Amino acid sequence: MGNLPGRGQGTEQPEPAGPAEDFEGADQRALGETLVRGCAAAGATVGMLYLPDPDHRVLHLAMTIGLARALALPWSRVVMDDSIPVADAVRDGRFVWLGGQEETARRYPRLGLVLPYDFALAAAPLVPDPAPEGAESIEAGLVLLWPGSHAPHLTGLERDAVDSACGQLANHLRRAADAGNPVRPPTYPVMLRPLPPPTPGPTEAAAAMAFIRRLPGGNCALDLNGTITFITAEAAELLGASVSRLRGAMPWEALPWMDTPVIEDHYRAAAISRLPRSFTATPPSGRSLRFDLHPDDTGISVRITLVTLDEPVPPRAAPTAAPAEPSPSRATALYQLMHLAAALTEAVHARDVVDQAADLLVPALGAQALALLVAEEQRLHIVGFRGYTAELMARYDGIPLGIHTASTHGLRTGDPLFFANADELAAAFPAVVIGDGMAAWAFLPLIASGRPIGTLILAYARPRPFVPGERAILTSLAGLIAQALDRARLYDSTHQLAHSLQTGLLPHALPGVPHLEVAASYLPAAHGLDIGGDFYDLIRIDDTTVAAAVGDVQGHNVNAAALMGQVRTAVHASAGAHPAEVLARTNRLLTDLEPGLFTSCVYAHIDLAARTAHLATAGHPPPLLRHAGGPAKMLHLPPGLLLGIDPDASYTSVEIPFEPGTLLALYTDGLIEVPGEDLEDGIAAVAARITATQEHHPVSMLADDLIGQARGGAPRTDDIALLLLRFAQERRHA
């Protein structure tokens, strides 16, 4: 939704005439028809269906109705972790409603920045109705938009229509998958058109044309892409161009004086909000014109009149000089910059920067390929690409900076290079063979903090003039990417260092103990550079006795990780003693160190020969215990003070039977914490998942299942440490 359409941008695809003609196959056609009906039933003006990629971490816009292709393209790929309504809806399995412009800007600043218009929005996950028991989540989503005139809340009938559309779409997807023909998202979103109104007869059409011509001023019609589909001779005369030149073109392309961000913004606002707009502009003739825009679901009707002296003047669109050669409109470029800037503020890793740049720039600028290269150890290394083959990129990965090529030029000089065709490139670098099959190139230096750090390559399938305005735009875009990439690479380096420190303090392997099945997992928090202090440990005392511990140091920094290592060392030093004594000794050590951080810990001493376990806790979440043949239950232990607060604190241990088949789960709170939910509900959910697992199920697979469930839920802000221990039952022989 961030870019206006323009000629020569290389992304236009033929738009279908109706929902039944959009796909190959009955399943795809059924989806299109259901989306059209769902929009109509809910009274929505725009509908967008998102489908997952094979690994379910990215949502792709599969089809949309009521929206121009170029407006939809920047939102055609949504990462599941993005702060975007459809990502939140699908990831968290919840309904998202935005009642207007103010709420959108408050809850989703990036969306509000790029689309500062008045509209209402709903995003919902697709859930089969009824949902088959045990079926995997579809992880697809529906987005609907209503005009800015909509009330701040949905009516009951509208909400029912949205829920019904989600259920029907989910059922279509489920049936197709069950039949072995899962619906995959297309390369480009399929643009559905609403059903056209009845075609008037010759007499009615002639009467309508006569009515239009009798109106004062001029009249024209734009489709949802902004293309002029109808214009009267009077309107063409006011605009200063012929009917033949204007019909089939976009106003800001056919008329250079209309190529302003303000004019296109009025069009964009009308197309998104479906609310009338008015503005004035002055063509080269010097006569001020008033434009009244009246949108609906099929396009925009425009009335053009001369501004009289006594008429209130709507906001004026600033004039602009005509460009020497065709290029993307200035408003298109502005929104490309805005959308890219907003997206890059949320890019965390270098991979995110590559994806955002490729998703936004390649389709919006009409490029067919993109490559991002960074300088490391006197060589250019490729960090990401789009539109090129991996084999071709491998040939150019690792080019020495000392070789004079178009890719290294910007690193030495800081200047961009533009080649309108292959002859220009060959003349500048006769010894270099690109071999990518393209016809025009832009080699843009990536400059961050005043120094070149790499090169952005944009390639085009056809010759391209690269007029001065476009060169400035591309250079600005490269600057945004460079800053984001430099920040992301620093993040990646720091994150890797933090991860190495953290994992280096955890056990590299767990000791083997006869008749004891053990599995451990550690999952860092989803976002941020913070280093957690969660840990687990298993200490072999002898062939039938082990000590197990799981803990969580307060804080998320290097100090927390270092203290975690000290806690593990203290527990190791006391292992074998009574659990209450182990915690007391560890507590005294921590208070002597005065780290300023507190630690929760649960410690278990398991004696397989005696078939008992002794446990004690220092302010830690309760373990889960499952006896053979029974459900998993919360194990209530006498509460103990967090370690590191009071050197004289004492702890109490509890003895429990630990018979063959018994499973003990120790974990940190990251496994059970769900935003907005009670901790006990989170513990109960984990216990229910353990209970639902077959007793013969390997504990390693159970650990993966529990971690996977936590990973796929709501965004987490804490690490997870998990330790599962099960007394293996003796096998009976026939």
Image: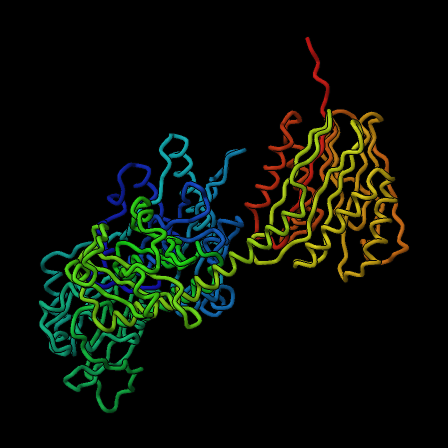
Taking depth in this image into account, of 55 and 441 the one nearest to the observer is 441
Q: Which residue lies most toward the top here?
A: 734
Left or right of 217 in this view: 156 = right
Q: Is residue 361 above or below residue 546?
A: below
Tell me the quarter of the picture where residue 7 sits.
bottom left
Q: In this view, does 1 lie above or below 236?
A: above
Residue 656 image offset from top left, x and y in percent: 83, 33
Left or right of 505 in this view: 579 = right
Residue 39 in sight here: no
Image quarter where the N terminus lies is: bottom left
Q: Which residue lies most toward the bottom here?
A: 309
Q: Is residue 722 above or below residue 589?
A: above
Residue 278 image offset from top left, x and y in percent: 29, 77
Image quarter where the C terminus lies is: top right
Q: In this view, does 434 lie above or below 419?
A: above
Tell me the quarter of the picture where residue 471 sits.
bottom left
Q: Which residue is drawn at 51% across and 68% down?
A: 106
Residue 135 image offset from top left, x and y in percent: 51, 34
Residue 664 image offset from top left, x and y in percent: 73, 35
Q: Residue at x 34, y 52 (%)?
A: 385
Q: Residue at x 62, y 39 (%)?
A: 706
Taking depth in this image into account, of 284 and 448 the one nearest to the observer is 448
Taking depth in this image into account, of 410 and 300 the one nearest to the observer is 410
